Image (cartoon, grey):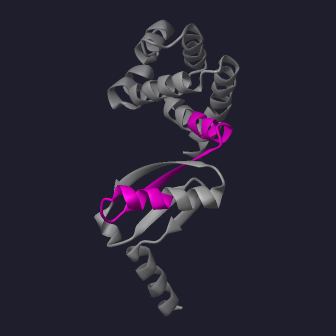
Amino acid sequence: MSQALTLARPYARAAFAIAREEGKFAPWSEALAFSARVAADPRVSALLSNPELARGDAVALLAPEAAGETYGRFLTLLAESHRLQQLPEIAGLFDQLRAEAENVVKATVTSAAALSADELEKIKLALRRRFGRDVEVSTAVDASLIGGAVIDAGDVVIDGSLKGKLSRLQTALAN
């Protein structure tokens, strides 16, 4: 996985530079997300690794209809460099660069049960205070947490789950 990220990083930075220059972060983000979803499909992935597939056909397969000419040239460059398989990683890195540029922290809150709108708003407010930036929160439910929640905000993970607390207690008692 780290090799895939290493290979994808220069392309993500290049895409980000182009999107910033054009002032089109959202369209590029959407186009990359579309292309990444298509490229990640096992059937398409097998097709992309076929040396008989023409570059133009690969680009036509991966480009959304609304994508501009610049995005098409970007996909052509990826095809020429044999990097179409790295589209999921490129899209992820692009979104990270975009979030940093827009001063936004993306966080995932995984809880044992669905959170109410009020609880989610309190978490957003606390994260906004902690990071000093706007926060985009996505949610997930994992019943194995037993209770509480785990907040993953990039480099920061806050484990307030009952499962995590029990695990830490077990480790403390064992030592």
Quarter containing the N terminus: top right
Q: Is residue 123 above or below residue 31?
A: below
Q: Pick whichever, 21 or 51, lies toward us.
A: 21
Residue at the spot x=66%, y=41% of the render?
Answer: 100
Residue 84 visible to the viewer: no
Q: Pick whichever, 122 or 5, lies toward us.
A: 122
Residue 98 visible to the viewer: yes
Q: Report if residue 109 lies within the magenta region.
A: yes
Q: Is residue 111 above or below residue 28?
A: below
The mark total stands at 0
Q: Residue 133: where, in percent of width, then height?
A: 64, 50
Residue at the spot x=56%, y=22% of the render?
Answer: 82
Magenta-drawn segment: 94-123
Q: Is residue 126 above or below residue 11?
A: below
Q: Pick whichever, 130 or 55, lies toward us.
A: 130
Q: Quadrant of residue 72?
A: top right
Q: Quadrant of residue 24?
A: top right
Q: Residue 64: where, in percent of width, then height?
A: 43, 16
Relative placement, left or right, of 132 versus 144 is right
Q: Residue 112: where, in percent of width, then height?
A: 33, 66
Q: Residue 97: where, in percent of width, then height?
A: 64, 37
